Amino acid sequence: MARTKMVNGEIFNLTAEEETARDAEEQAWSDGAPARAVKRVQTYRRAAYERESDPIFFKEQRGEVEVGTWAAAIAAIKAANPKP
Amino acid sequence: MGYLVQGGAPPDASVSTDKVVDDAITLAKMAGGTDGNLISYDTNGDVAAVATGDSGQVLTSNGAGAAPTFQAAAGGGAWTLLATTNASNVASIAFTELDSSAYDTYMVVIENVTPAGFEVFLTMRTSTDGGSTYDNSGYRWNCQENHDGASSYNSGSTSDSEFQLHGTTEAGDAAEETFSSTIIISRPQDTTNTTFIANSVWLDKNGVCYAGRAGGVRVSAADVDAIQFLWTSGNFTTTGSLKLLGLTNAV
């Protein structure tokens, strides 16, 4: 089914060139899904490390929490954000 | 007082202010005037008419000691709604009505649109030929996203094929998982880089609410005279609308 576009409220069919370009863009987007999934997990984990496990690391260094608490926090973050 | 007892009319110039009760003077008792004039006071403190202005003029104070006059409204600074488009099952939605003779800066208000499929980002491209083609290179952008669980994510690109309004968490495609944004496009008519600022809110495929602040630049010494919105893949749905507003040129 041919794609359409809206310009100033009016709908037109894509030209052949636009269809070809959009096909290529959507294929590239589809092909890039695995890489994006990995990057997304990395982003989510990094944010969680900063927010959750990094403070525990320093507490553990100061002896304020049991040894192994930081490692457990890391493991929990990884479990919550599994690699694809 | 004899003339009252006798039932005769009072002589000219004989009725003092005290003899006229409050609220006694009706409009019908006032002398006729010129259509559109307003009643004011002149520099002597006497009643005077303000001349009718031309169509579209506004009443303007001329300061203390001077009667107001009708004058052209000061130009610039007002947002004007240029176009409203309801979303549809289309691959892209474009506005080509950028008019540098009338507007300096534009705002696009995106209201509750959704993609036809999830795990896509909403993007914007620009044109230098009135929308015949849209540039697919030379965009720099960055975005900080926060979600309602308080996490914050950064994303960006130094050389992309479009300006992404968000870059870490994609929009959901369920009916209630809508995407809204306001985007400011600064002086696109200038033949220098064109900048964008977007403040967006959306729900992802898990129903988590995200808010994102994105900034971007179309790196090109060319003007921008049309803009296009598209998802990184797939169509829009019939949900939502887009509005284009222009900030009237300063005088």
Image (cartoon, rainbow, N blue to C red):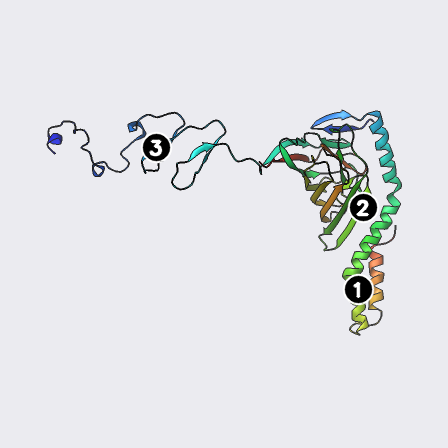
Q: Label 2, secondary structure: give it.
A: strand
Indicate whether B249 appears above or below B155. Answer: above
Residue B205 lies in quadrant: top right
What chain letter is assigned to the residue under label 3?
B
Residue B223 lies in quadrant: top right
**Do marks 1 and 2 both belong to one polypeptide chain?**
no
Q: Which circle, 2 or 3, is nearer the viewer?
A: 3
Residue at 79% over, 47% down: B156
Residue at 85% over, 36% down: A26
What chain letter is assigned to the residue under label 1?
A
Does residue B59 appear left or right of residue B149 in this picture?
A: left
Sort mark 3 into few (<14), some (14-19) or many (20+) by Cα contacts within 10 Å: some
**Residue of label 2:** B157
Does residue A26 appear left or right of residue B32 in this picture?
A: right
**Residue of label 1:** A54
Expressed as whole percent of the image width and height from the top left, the position of residue A65 reads: 79, 72
The kind of residue on which mark 1 rests is Asp
Numbered circle sitting on residue B48 = 3
Q: Which circle, 1 or 2, is nearer the viewer?
A: 2
Cα–Cα gap, marks 2 and 3: 66 Å
Cα–Cα gap, marks 1 and 2: 27 Å
Residue A75 lies in quadrant: bottom right
The kind of residue on which mark 3 rests is Ala
The kind of residue on which mark 2 rests is Ser
